[in-house]
Amino acid sequence: MNAAFSERSSASLTQASIGARVRSDPSFSAFWILRLGFVVLPLLMGVDKFTNVMTYWPAYLSDWVVGLLPFSAQTAMYIVGVVEIIAAIGIAVKPRYSSYVVALWLLGIVVNLLLLGGVLDIALRDVGLFVAALALTRLAAQYDAPWGAKHAQGGRK
């Protein structure tokens, strides 16, 4: 068993102890800030792919990508929206694994934006999100128990 998860049992990690730990342990609070951010933001962005309220999302696909698709750019955005919603759920459930998926997804978005051109500011922002997702992968390795671990998340004190 992983020694990082052997200190606390599932029963001892209550919401109150999580709250106290968030207030007292900077790395644990960073894990939760990133985790919550990568749940809320992809969820909102994924839902918006169906409504185009924030922006017209198909315009963010590079022409060569659209040319490869056997369907419309909006249909592609529906698929992207579903992936983003699934990614948000994955981070909520198991950030230890899904944070890698989110990081790779963001890297793909950055590549698409660089190929699109004219949106380097947005690509740079997404590089920042990619870096944050990588930070979440490292923190999740500490604070999110592997599948099958008998002890709850908690990490080392």
Image (spheres, grey):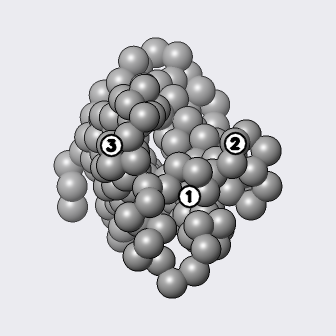
The x, y position of residue 29, in whole percent, is: 46, 25
Can residue 27 be seen by looking at this rendering? yes
Per the model, the C-alpha gap separating discs 1 and 2 is 16 Å
Seen in the picture, residue 88 relative to 148 is either above or below; the reply is: above
Residue bearing mark 2: 55
**Which comes before the other along the chain, label 1 or label 2?**
2
The secondary structure type at the circle numbered 2 is loop
Which three-letter amino acid code belongs to the residue tagged 2? Thr
Q: What's the residue at 63%, 37% (across, down)?
A: 15
**Does 113 appear above or below 17?**
below
Question: What amino acid type is highlighted by mark number 3?
Answer: Leu
Is residue 100 in view from this perspective? no
Residue in the image at 64% along x and 42% along y: 40
Amino acid at pointer 1 = Glu
Q: Of marks 2 and 3, which one's residue comes earlier in the chain?
A: 2
Q: Which residue is mark 3?
A: 114
Q: Are marks 1 and 2 in contact (CB under 8 Å)?
A: no
Residue 44 sits above or below residue 28 on the image:
below
Q: Secondary structure at mark 3?
A: helix
- Residue 106: x, y in percent? 39, 48
User: Where in the figure is residue 152, as x and y percent of width and height?
Assistant: 44, 52
* Mark sitting earlier along the chain (3/1): 1
Crowding around mark 2 (Cα neighbors within 10 Å: few <14, some 14 to 19, many 20+) is: few
Q: Quadrant of the C terminus?
A: top left
Quadrant location of residue 123? Answer: top left
How many angstroms separate mark 2 from mark 3 (CA)?
18 Å
Give me the residue at 38% from left, 40% from top.
117
Q: Which residue is mark 1?
A: 84
Query: Does residue 54 appear left or right of residue 153 in this picture?
Result: right
